[in-house]
Image (cartoon, coloured by chain):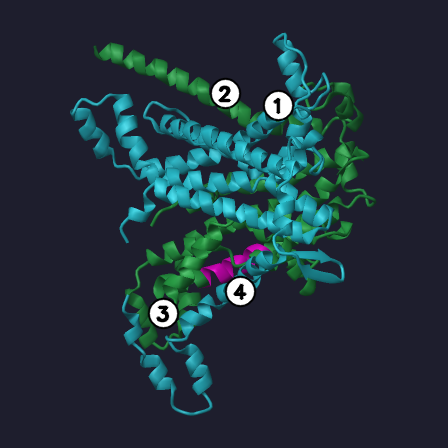
Chain colours: A green, B cyan
Amino acid sequence: MKYAEKSKWSLNRVLLLLLFIALAIFALFPIVTLAIASFKPAQELLRNGLNLRLDRDLLTFSNYTNLFSPKEHYVTWYKNSILITFTFTLLCLLLSSMVGYAFAVYKFRMRNSLFALVIIIMAIPIEIIMLPMYKLSISLHLINNMWGVILPFVVAPLPIFFFRQYAGGLPKDFLDAARVDGCTEYGIFFKIMMPLMAPAFSSMAILQALASWNNFLWPLIVLNSTNKLTIPIGLSTLLTPYGNNYKILIAGSVFAIIPVLIVFVFFQKYFIEGMTAGGVKG
Amino acid sequence: MSNTNTPKVTQVKQTSGSTSMSSLLYSQKLAPYVFVLPFIISFSVFFAYPVISAFIMSFQEIVPGSTKFIGIENYKELWNPTFLKAIKNSAIYTALSLLLLIPIPLVLAVFLNSKVMMFKNFFRSTLFIPALTSVVVAGTIFRLAFGELEGSLMNTLITSFGLDKQRWLGERWLGMMTLLILACWRWMGINMLYFMAGLQNISKEVYESAEIDGANIWNKFANITVPLLKPITVYVFTISIYGGFAMFTESYMLWNGNRSPKDIGLTIVGYLYRSGWEQNNLGIGAAVGIVLLAITMIITFVQLNLFGLFKKEE
């Protein structure tokens, strides 16, 4: 009886393992084919599309050297992306953590109604207000400017929600003690609470940086001169009705994933926490 | 939470008149408003104002230099086959992606969480990797893999099974299928993670006492796991609906920027983008936005009733 049960489990185990191996292949396969394609000449891609064939004689690094050639804009896009991602993440974390903290720690008039607004913003697709936002950005001189990409979304509802949950779970007994010692309200936040919220900052930093790095629709609308574009927008301009510049597109795509993969390998835990943050009920 | 009755510091500081402004700024009464100020500003400028002006714009004809009210003309004009097709495409995409991306990740999460599963962390991370790619990169991969050419990945695959090569992005249902495969590829891992996070909150004792009562695996799944995962399921359901109806970039990337044959890949946001930016018809574009808002609000309302969230305590 016991033996039978054990062997039954091992059959399940094998089946489960096979299922997940198949899924892992499904997940990785497209990225691997893209990586392979980045070492093939572009004509080969035009002729055959994406596939796993790898002809040794055709192997080339020219797609990558091309990325850095001065007549291409890829390096500029990369710099823009880094600058926007960095600035956006920094500001977003600072402002959202302040707001979330206030919701969690203080009792003040309008607290509940303001927090309800946070939830409402989360529940409304931003695509709805894209057009008026575009008009507004024109009148605020934010078009074709990195601040136009950053400012409208820098106080983000999800991080506010997350920081509120996190700060709400922290002990608050020592806040009064700190006040008696002459610490100001702002001192309490910056010197005491911020360090305590470090894990929340890590998760949110990763979530926001990834979202900013991959962001598409709004930057597509706001940015329009070639030297201002971010990587995703720049890459998408390579697809035109008159022909596609696969050379830059493929190698550029691979090169854009690499930093994300590196960060993922080292900070997996925060990735997973950050990405599933919305589902955390508190 | 009664830290409002400790205004010690402020009282000490309120000694001279010149410092009263700064002491007010530092007071415990004002501090929370200073903290939430960024939200108030950002909400008014970048949310409330655009929402209100979207409403107003949707009743206007806006051409460079002149703006005039035209009543519901914009909405009347939206009653055309192309926009109805866009709504239909978005609705079908949303419905099918819900059908695929809720039950499957839920079951996978249960599998991955089971005692007999090996290499849990490895699989969890691997299935998560597609979510790291941008839609631009993912779209590039898929449009190449689902190309019309005989040598493309998908055509090589199906011709090896003896089937004819297909124009994947040229036919309605094949195009929809490509969009759905892309959605599954990017979201399967994340949704699975959501459900795994939910599973972590179910205590083992519940299962153990069910086992004592003679429950089999199926009983446990249907009567414990699924009901207890309800909050997380509602959450995933909600974000998937919004994501589905707001889908645009995937189609933009697969069909060379909003240009799918016979509009097989046109979505509501695609139509908004087309009328607002490509045809520069801001009034119509704003009206499309309001229609999308109405759709999401109806869905939210139905869903809240369906899941009984109105009856919830609090």
Tag 3 or tag 2, which sits nearer the N-term? 2
Q: Position of residue B222 (x, y in %)?
A: 29, 27
Q: Residues within 10 Å of mark 3 (few under 14, many from 20)?
A: some
The correct choice, above or below, for A265 with respect to A178 in the image is above
Q: Looking at numbered disc 1 in the image, what kind of residue is underneath it?
A: Leu
Residue at 65% across, 49% down: B284
Circle 4 residues within 10 Å: few <14, some 14–19, many ≥20: few
Name the residue beneath numbered marker 4: B44
| The furthest residue to the left | B213
> Which residue, given by chain and number where applicable, does mark 1 sit on?
B174
Give the alpha-carbon distance from disc 1 to disc 3, as whole Å.
55 Å
Mark 2 in CB contact with mark 3 (< 8 angstroms): no
Q: Which residue is mark 3?
A: A108
Q: Which residue is mark 2?
A: A22
Q: Are marks 2 and 3 on the same chain?
A: yes
Amino acid at circle 3: Phe
Is residue A97 covered in magenta?
A: yes
Q: Which residues are magenta?
A: A88-98
Q: Gap in Å between the C-alphas at discs 1 and 2?
A: 23 Å
Question: Of marks 4 and 1, which one's residue comes earlier in the chain?
Answer: 4
